[in-house]
Amino acid sequence: MAVISSASPVSIASLFRPIRKYPTLPDLVITATSTSCLSSLSQPMDDRQQPGSKKRVVVCGGGIIGVCTAYFLAKKGAAVTLVEKSSVACAASGKAGGFLALDWCDGGPVESLARASFNLHRSLSEELNGPDSYGYRPLTTLSITVTESGPSSPSGSKSSGDSMIPSWVDGATRGPRTIGTTQTTAQVHPQLFTRTLLNTAVEKYGVEVVIGKLEQLRVEEGRVGSVVLEGGRVIESDSVVLSLGPWTGKFEMLASMFRVSGLKAHSIVLEPKDPGAITPHALFLSFHPQGGKAMDPEVYPRPTGEVYICGMSAEEEVPDDPEQIVGNPASIAMLKRVGKSVSSHLREGEARVKVEQACFLPCTDDGVPIIGEVPGMKGCYVATGHSCWGILNGPATGAAVAELVLEVNQFFTLHKKIDILIDS
């Protein structure tokens, strides 16, 4: 194990454990081969920066981590350019469930990060009118066992005496258990959240968004100097933040340091005919299909009246273009079976299938995200590998990286230390 850490003697550096040193890099040009990654502009402090001038930062990646980083950098006074190859929140940040939990990471290395980020989500919702802008709301979370019924089974076969189960959950259910309350669990619509945050960063703090493909990262005397986009455009920078998600492994420099793989996760979005009947209860299921093994899908009603159902994941090769990602038909079909087994409101004829989709979650070998400055390369930072907790941990990650880049310490003085490990 190793840790990417800040080399700056500021207090936020204490959030990261020391790591083994990499050799100092000579002047070079690092090329992103076959990558559909994103890049963003950021400016760290160094001798080249004029007193009183803004630090220029390029953030690479238009997902939740990159956008949160760009937002907090610009809010703290940096001149930020965010570079995205395709469109903002086009991958997992637009297709995730958006579930938030205060304490589900307790006991692990990201406990403090998750708790800080859950509370930061609440603060951002107050600042950005989250309930109306992107569906932020607290909700109750239940664990329920659901058994798939045969085609001739009557509707409304919920076990008697289970008053804890919402009335709209009328399938063959048992063993309900509350695993989250409105104080400890909440949700956002991830695509709307990401785009709302970026729109605010652009309109209020002057972030520039560039649609383009990262080709090269130029390093001079061990320090990042600029990024080069496909077509030859050069963006000068004082710092660069690489928030490439599952495409991190396609950037050769980072792939040589650690592994970030892609876990393909499927989801569907349903529109029930009677959305008013669906109460704000997130469901974590133990689903027992006929003739198959038990699985653990999740069901998230949204304030928009939609119901999001996800599950059926497997590690696969990440395609270069996020627009090329499509769901596997068998996985999508299984999620539809989950929906109609949970509720008569989600059966064919009672709900329209609005979206069938898949995305890749960025995963590290030990399940812990990679956050910090790249050893031996001053001004180059990485933030990736958040797996299924990217939406939850995006705000606190963005705030932490902004402090590392700008060498300030405001946000995390209010929170416990975090230890972010990476697989070396």
Image (cartoon, rainbow, N blue to C red):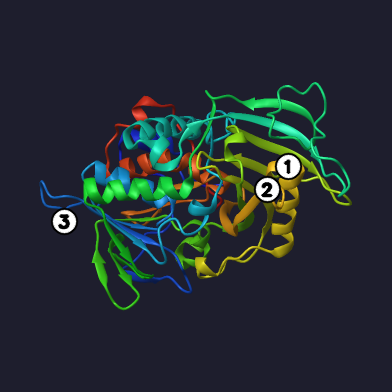
Q: Residue at x 27, y 37 (%)?
A: 408
Residue at mark 3 to residue at mark 2: CA–CA distance: 63 Å
Residue 99: where, in percent of width, then height? Answer: 55, 39
Q: Earlier in the sequence, mark 1 or mark 2?
A: 1
- Which residue is disc 3 drawn over? 48
Give the foreground label among 1 and 3: 1
- Which residue is disc 1 drawn over? 344
Label 3–label 2 contact, CB within 8 A:
no
* Side of 342 where 256 appears, left or right: left
Report helix, strand or loop for mark 1: helix
Identity, as a three-letter code, of the amino acid under mark 2: Glu
Q: Is residue 270 above or below residue 122?
A: below
Q: Residue at x 21, y 44 (%)?
A: 77
- Which residue is disc 2 drawn over? 350
Residue at mark 1 to residue at mark 3: CA–CA distance: 64 Å
Whether residue 356 is visible here, answered yes or no, is yes
Q: Earlier in the sequence, mark 1 or mark 3?
A: 3
Identity, as a three-letter code, of the amino acid under mark 1: Ser
Q: Is residue 237 above or below residue 303?
A: below
Disc ID at residue 231? none
Residue nearer the viewer, 113 or 138: 138
Which residue is at the far bottom? 231
Residue 230: where, in percent of width, then height? Answer: 35, 75
Label 1–label 2 contact, CB within 8 A:
yes
Q: Residue at x 25, y 66 (%)?
A: 235
